[in-house]
């Protein structure tokens, strides 16, 4: 029972981690919380649904196409709604992001209605018994695919030239620029990667819960953002750890304490963690200067 | 001619304004009681925007859970009036104080936190409060909410007409404006703004960020709680649905659209954000879409808001230059 709950918690934690990465990638560079990220995740899910249901695409190409499409949308949003505001006061892009969030969710309601869409059954109800734990196919897919994506992202960020440029930009935009890095492209890239990961997470959630709806990005976005802060926002391993931790805590609360108070417990954990370590678990301490 | 008339006009302006505010509900009453309702909504949201403005505009804390204080005020007042059979006139200050105490609590919880970390804690606080309303069992009556909250009673005469509520809301707003104006134009206001501009600097010159941030939360929460108490009695029905994250964002948008750290700005922002969805009714299906777009465009072309803080700044600088 305990291990089964842990496995279920890790499954949903993987999803949170994928979304949290989008928050953290952008935050690490721009110190900006992309409030529209939850809605990008929702749009990604709808695009996936559209590809599978209407165009009868097989699962793998649908994942890839939806990720690319959502990445492009993320880049467009950055270009149009955030980039012109980069030199403005910090609160200005935040409000702009809230505007984008309202825009995207009402656009989705306009295009697909306010109701819940079921996902066409692309997965059987086959379950696997792994050492006494029961996994559904989709659960395994979430665990394996998310893990692979995170490893891939980690290798990309640490082992490639562009990844190095990304890390350099997140240390200091000005200095990165002086080193000849096209920081605007790196920022676009951060939005693209974050949005693509969110789209993959969105499709997997859609299949997992068999439901896609225009307001799905709200709670998922808040939870993933909380997870990113819990792990230490701006830190890529922090987002992964925070996401998993958040999913596990949420699931255990639901299983052993009470479902309605799930969020109360998760947010209380967040507040306690921040009181002990104000920059999150893996966050770096900021040096404050006047 | 123009120069001659200007001072006279200036002197007459407050009087004209007062006359307009007094005459307005009677005119609206003639048209439709729905218009009066919108006017009351503007007044109450103006109080909410002003109270959030103390936290965001003056203390510089990006707070995302302001609807929680509104809710705490509303639920406290409703429960005191219904279960405690307290009069509205006692329930309102009690609700404001209760919300204020939660403000202190939230301020203290965020002692060690800055910026976005504090923002997420306020967001978490808002969610927790809403969930307590939803899952409060018999006390809060869960997602169904509390119906049948009594109207304010004035010496045996129960306020029922919308116009009467309008004047009560107006008085509440004037009191809020008065207190907040006095506070932000005092030494406390300057201390708060110092913290907003640079917290480390403020700390190093002897302004305790903790003390003033807790104060800002308390003051902001107090007035939001009072607004909540009024709302509960006016609508006579409250449910957790009125106090969601999106409502906090809506209040936040009012502060920003109006102009951060500006008292007339907050009032104006509330008016714009309450009226905009009403005026956009003719494009019914697209109104939220347009609202989102409008917010983005506003941030691009007029990020400082409609009625920005600038004048005040010039004034402060001039004094220090002497």
Image (cartoon, rainbow, N blue to C red):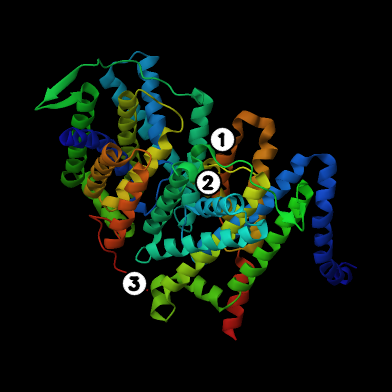
Between B44 and A201, which is closer to the camera in this rendering?
Answer: B44
The circle on residue A289 is 3
Callouts 3 and 2 close, C-beta under 8 Å: no
- Chain of residue at mark 1: B
Name the mark nearer the viewer: 2 or 1. 2
- Residue A252 position in % (x across, y down): 25, 40
Badge 3 element: loop
Tell which subunit mark 3 falls on.
A
Name which quarter of the figure residue B260 lies in.
Answer: bottom right
Q: Mark 2 — residue?
A: B243
- Cα–Cα span, label 2 and label 1: 22 Å
Looking at the image, residue B266 sits to the left or right of residue A193; the answer is: right
- The disc at residue B289 is 1
The one of B274 and A43 positioned closer to us in this rendering: B274
Q: As displayed, is residue B140 above or below residue B211?
A: above
- Element type where label 2 sits in the image: helix
Residue A51, position in %: x, y? 37, 19
For the residues labelled 3 and 2, the Cα–Cα distance comes to 38 Å
Circle 2 packing at 10 Å, graded few (<14), some (14-19), many (20+), is many
Q: Residue A145: horizontal and vertical position, in percent?
A: 21, 30
Whether residue B283 is visible to the viewer of this picture, yes or no, is yes
């Amino acid at each position: 029972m305990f291990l089964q709950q842990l496995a279920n918690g890790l499954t949903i934690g993987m999803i949170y981690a994928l979304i949290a990465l989008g928050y953290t990638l952008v935050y690490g560079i721009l110190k900006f919380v992309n409030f529209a990220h939850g809605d990008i995740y929702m749009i990604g899910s709808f695009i996936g649904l559209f590809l599978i249901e209407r165009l009868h695409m097989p699962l793998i190409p649908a994942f890839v196409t939806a990720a690319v499409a959502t990445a492009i949308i993320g880049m467009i949003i950055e270009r149009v709604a955030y980039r012109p505001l980069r030199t403005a006061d910090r609160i200005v892009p935040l409000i702009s992001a809230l505007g984008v969030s309202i825009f995207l969710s009402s656009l989705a309601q306009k295009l697909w209605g306010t109701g819940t869409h079921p996902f066409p059954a692309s997965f059987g109800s086959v379950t696997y018994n792994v050492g006494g734990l029961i996994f559904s196919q989709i659960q395994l897919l979430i665990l394996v695919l998310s893990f692979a994506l995170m490893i891939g992202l980690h290798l990309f960020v640490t082992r490639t030239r562009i990844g190095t440029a990304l890390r350099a930009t997140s240390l200091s935009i000005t200095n990165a620029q002086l080193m000849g890095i096209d920081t605007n492209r790196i920022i676009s890239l951060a939005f693209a990667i974050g949005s693509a990961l969110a789209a993959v997470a969105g499709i997997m959630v859609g299949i997992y819960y068999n439901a896609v709806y225009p307001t799905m990005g709200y709670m998922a976005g808040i939870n993933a953002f909380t997870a990113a802060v819990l792990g230490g926002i701006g830190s890529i391993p922090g987002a992964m750890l925070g996401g998993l931790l958040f999913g596990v805590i949420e699931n255990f609360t639901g299983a052993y304490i009470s479902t309605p108070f799930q969020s109360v417990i998760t947010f209380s954990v967040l507040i306690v963690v921040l009181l002990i370590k104000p920059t999150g678990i893996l966050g770096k301490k900021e040096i404050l200067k006047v | 001619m123009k120069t001659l008339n200007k001072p006279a006009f200036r002197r007459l302006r407050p009087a004209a304004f007062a006359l307009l505010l007094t005459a307005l509900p009677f005119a609206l009453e003639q048209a439709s009681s729905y218009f009066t309702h919108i006017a009351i909504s503007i007044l109450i949201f103006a109080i909410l925007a002003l109270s959030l403005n103390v936290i965001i505009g003056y203390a510089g804390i990006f707070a995302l859970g302001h609807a929680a204080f509104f809710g705490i005020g509303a639920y406290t007042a409703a429960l005191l009036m219904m279960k405690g059979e307290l009069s509205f006139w006692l329930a309102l200050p009690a609700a404001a104080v209760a919300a204020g105490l939660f403000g202190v609590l939230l301020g203290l919880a965020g002692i060690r936190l800055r910026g976005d970390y504090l923002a997420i804690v306020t967001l978490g606080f808002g969610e927790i409060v809403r969930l307590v309303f939803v899952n409060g069992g018999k006390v809060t009556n869960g997602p169904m909410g509390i119906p049948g909250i009594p109207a304010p009673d004035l010496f045996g005469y129960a306020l029922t007409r919308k116009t009467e509520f309008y004047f009560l809301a107006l008085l509440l707003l004037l009191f809020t404006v008065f207190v907040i104006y006095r506070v932000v134009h005092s030494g406390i206001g300057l201390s708060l703004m110092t913290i907003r501009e640079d917290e480390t600097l403020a700390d190093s010159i002897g302004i305790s960020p903790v003390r003033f941030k807790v104060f800002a939360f308390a003051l902001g929460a107090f007035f939001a709680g009072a607004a909540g108490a009024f709302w509960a009695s006016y609508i006579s029905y409250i449910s957790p649905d009125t106090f969601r994250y999106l409502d906090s964002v809506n209040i936040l948008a009012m502060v920003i659209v109006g102009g951060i750290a500006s008292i007339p700005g907050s009032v104006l922002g509330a008016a714009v954000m309450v009226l905009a969805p009403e005026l956009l009714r003719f494009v019914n299906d697209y109104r939220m879409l347009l609202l989102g777009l409008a917010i983005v465009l506003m941030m691009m072309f007029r990020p400082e808001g409609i009625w920005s803080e600038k004048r005040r700044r010039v004034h402060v600088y001039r004094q220090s230059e002497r």
